[in-house]
C-alpha cells in the first residue's frame, strides 16, 4: 500500500509542490519568450537604424549580387553553430543538432544588445532544460568569442600585406598580441586557467576541460567561417565593380580583421561602428572609400537579416514540435575523451 497517497495532508502537500513547479515552469517559459522578443527587437532596430543607407546601397547593386551574398552568409552561420556545439562537446556535453541549433541561433540575437553578455545569458537560459552547468555555458560562450578573435586576427595578420598601406599603418599592432592569444588558448594553459578563475569565483571546476584535438577542430572550422564571410564581402565588391582576383584576398582578410575588432569592442552591439570603420579601411585598397563603406553596411545588414531568419525559424520549430532537453546532456566519463 502506498502510504503517501493514503494521507490527505501528504497528498495535498505533493499536489501543492507539483502546482508550484508547474507555475514556476510556466513563468520560466514566458520569461524565455520575453527575452527572445526583446533580443529580436534590438536586431530589428539595428536594421531600421541603417535602413536609408542600406536602401541606397542596394540601388547600386544588381539583384544577383545581393542574393548570392546571402549564400555564404547563411553557410557561415551554420558552420558557427557546429563550432559552438563542438566546444560544448569538448567540455563534456554533447547536444543533439536540433537542440544546439535552437540555443545557438536564438542566442545570436543577444549580440545586438549593448553590453556584450546577452548572447551568453541567453545560452545559459536556453541550456537549462539540458542540465548543462552555468559555468560550462559561460565557458563555451567566452571560448567561442576568444577563438573567433584569435583566428580572425591571425588570418588578418597573414593577409595584411595585401590590404594596402592604410590598413597596415593603422592595425600593425595586432601582430604583437597574436602570440599572447595563441598561447592562452593552448589547452595546457587554458584548462588550468579556467579552473583557477572558477576557484577564485568560488565555483566548482569544469566537468571537463578543453582538449588539444577539440580546440584544433574548432580552429579549423572557424577558419572556414572567415572564408565564407570573406566570400560574402567579395560578392558585394565584385557586384560594385571591384577586380575579382585582387579583391578576394582583401575581402577575406579585411572582414576577419573587422569582425574580430568588433568583437573586442565590448559594450557595442555587434561591434557597431568599429567593424564598419575597419572594413572600410581594408576594402579601400581595391575600391574607393564610399563604395567600401557601402559594402561594409550591406555586409552588416545581410548578416543581421540572416541572424533574424535563423532565430525566427528555430523559434517557430520550437513552437510546433515537442520540446527537447528534459534529460541531462550526454556527458563523457571522467578521464575519457569528449563524446563524439
Image (spheres, grey):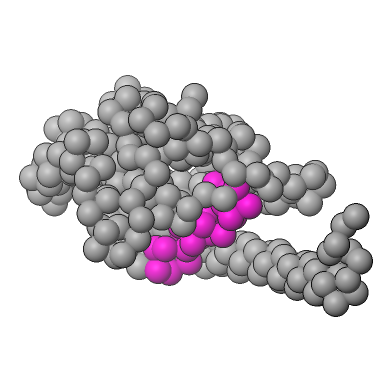
Q: Nearer the viewer, residue 231 or 263?
A: 263
Residue 20, x across and y down, in percent: 75, 73
Q: Quadrant of residue 125?
A: bottom right
- Asked whether, in this view, residue 155 is left or right of residue 271, the answer is left
Q: Residue at x 55, y 35 (%)?
A: 330
**Image quadrant in which the N terminus is located:** bottom right
Query: In the displayed structure, would residue 24 be above or below residue 315?
Result: below
Q: Residue at x 42, y 29 (%)?
A: 338
> What residue span does the magenta drawing correspond to?
103-130
Q: Quadrant of residue 168?
A: top left
Residue 271, x across and y down, in percent: 36, 59
Magenta stretch, main secondary structure class = helix
Residue 268, x across and y down, in percent: 37, 66
Residue 220, x across and y down, in percent: 34, 26
Total marks in image = 0
Q: Nearer the viewer, residue 163 or 112?
A: 112
Q: Say whether residue 106 is magenta.
A: yes
- Asked whether, in this view, residue 246 is left or right of residue 224, the answer is left
Furthest-bottom residue in this view: 9
Q: Residue at x 52, y 67 (%)?
A: 49
Q: Nearer the viewer, residue 150 or 335?
A: 335
Q: Nearer the viewer, residue 26 or 259?
A: 26
| Residue 274 in view, yes or no | no
| Residue 33 in view, yes or no | yes
Q: Say whether residue 187 is magenta.
A: no
Amino acid at each position: 500500500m502506498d502510504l503517501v497517497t493514503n494521507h490527505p495532508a501528504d497528498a495535498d502537500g505533493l499536489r501543492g509542490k507539483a502546482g508550484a513547479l508547474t507555475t514556476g515552469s510556466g513563468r520560466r517559459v514566458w520569461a524565455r519568450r520575453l527575452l527572445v522578443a526583446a533580443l529580436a527587437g534590438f536586431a530589428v532596430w539595428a536594421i531600421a537604424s541603417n535602413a536609408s543607407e542600406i536602401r541606397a546601397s542596394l540601388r547600386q547593386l544588381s539583384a544577383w549580387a545581393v542574393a548570392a551574398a546571402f549564400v555564404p552568409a547563411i553557410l557561415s552561420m551554420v558552420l558557427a553553430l557546429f563550432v559552438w556545439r563542438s566546444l560544448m562537446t569538448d567540455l563534456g556535453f554533447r547536444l543533439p543538432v536540433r537542440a544546439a541549433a535552437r540555443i545557438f541561433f536564438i542566442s545570436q540575437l543577444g549580440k545586438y544588445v549593448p553590453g556584450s553578455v546577452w548572447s551568453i545569458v541567453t545560452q545559459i537560459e536556453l541550456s537549462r532544460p539540458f542540465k548543462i552547468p552555468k559555468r560550462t555555458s559561460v565557458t563555451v560562450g567566452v571560448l567561442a568569442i576568444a577563438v573567433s578573435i584569435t583566428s580572425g586576427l591571425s588570418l588578418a595578420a597573414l593577409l595584411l600585406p595585401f590590404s594596402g598601406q592604410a590598413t597596415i599603418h593603422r592595425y600593425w599592432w595586432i601582430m604583437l598580441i597574436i602570440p599572447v592569444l595563441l598561447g592562452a588558448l593552448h589547452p595546457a594553459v587554458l584548462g588550468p586557467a579556467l579552473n583557477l578563475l572558477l576557484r577564485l569565483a568560488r565555483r566548482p571546476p569544469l566537468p571537463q576541460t578543453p582538449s588539444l584535438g577539440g580546440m584544433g577542430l574548432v580552429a579549423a572550422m572557424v577558419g572556414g567561417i572567415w572564408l565564407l564571410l570573406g566570400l560574402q564581402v567579395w560578392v558585394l565588391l565584385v557586384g560594385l565593380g571591384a577586380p575579382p582576383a585582387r579583391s578576394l584576398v582583401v575581402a577575406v582578410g579585411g572582414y576577419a580583421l573587422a569582425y574580430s575588432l568588433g568583437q573586442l569592442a565590448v559594450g557595442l552591439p555587434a561591434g557597431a561602428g568599429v567593424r564598419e570603420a575597419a572594413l572600410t579601411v581594408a576594402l579601400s585598397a581595391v575600391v574607393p572609400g564610399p563604395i567600401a563603406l557601402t559594402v561594409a553596411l550591406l555586409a552588416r545588414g545581410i548578416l543581421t537579416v540572416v541572424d533574424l531568419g535563423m532565430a525566427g525559424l528555430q523559434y517557430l520549430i520550437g513552437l510546433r514540435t515537442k520540446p527537447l532537453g528534459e534529460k541531462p546532456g550526454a556527458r563523457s566519463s571522467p578521464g575519457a575523451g569528449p563524446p563524439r
